[in-house]
Amino acid sequence: MRFDSPEALLDAVGTDLGTSDWLTVDQARIDRFADATDDHQWIHVDPERAAGGPFGATVAHGYLSLSLLAPFLFELLQVDACALVVNAGSDRVRFVSPVRAGSRIRARASIAGAERTSTGIRARTAVTLEIEGAEKPALVAETLTVFVHA
């Protein structure tokens, strides 16, 4: 969904942003995240050992899943007349289900709130990260993004 200015978000609270495209979380992505964060726990990077573990396969780091919200939200929410867009954090994050290597995920989002700041508009987005074919989501979160005036 595209908005013509940050101020337009003030009137968009409650707007459903829909769903993103599917993204496959493959082992190579998981391994790169492990290298970037120095988190090489076997449930993430050792497919043979993980096959006999609690999830039956390697799984993505929770923070990898969380980090993918940024590109998903960029796909779902475009705001014109911004100098820049700043991730201001998350108020609520719950990791509900593991994302097994090879799974496809997508985001479903809505605008849960918006308020003026000294530099622009801070939007609160309610996001659910869905796993294809799974009953429960990978995570649910409320993210905060500041759309800085141009």
Image: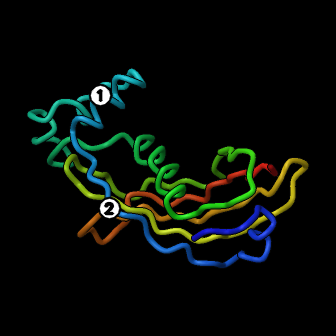
* Location of mark 1 (residue): 41
In this figure, which residue is indicated by the disc labeled 2? 22
| Residue positioned 22% across, 30% down in the render | 45
- Name the amino acid, label 1: Gln
Q: Quadrant of residue 88?
A: top right
- 135 and 64: which is toward the camera: 64
Q: In the displayed structure, does residue 39 sit left or right of residue 49?
A: right
Labels 2, 1: front one: 2
Q: Residue at x 75, y 56 (%)?
A: 81
Left or right: 73 as drawn, with respect to 5 = left
Q: Quadrant of residue 84 in the image?
A: top right
Secondary element under disc 1, as helix, strand or loop, is loop
Residue 88 at least partly seen: no
Question: Is residue 61 in sight in this rendering?
Answer: yes
The residue depicted at 36 percent of the width and 31 percent of the height is 33
Residue plotted at (29% across, 36% down): 30
Q: Earlier in the sequence, mark 2 or mark 1?
A: 2
- Identify the secondary structure beneath mark 2: loop
Above or below, 38 relative to 75: above
Q: Is residue 146 above or below residue 109?
A: above
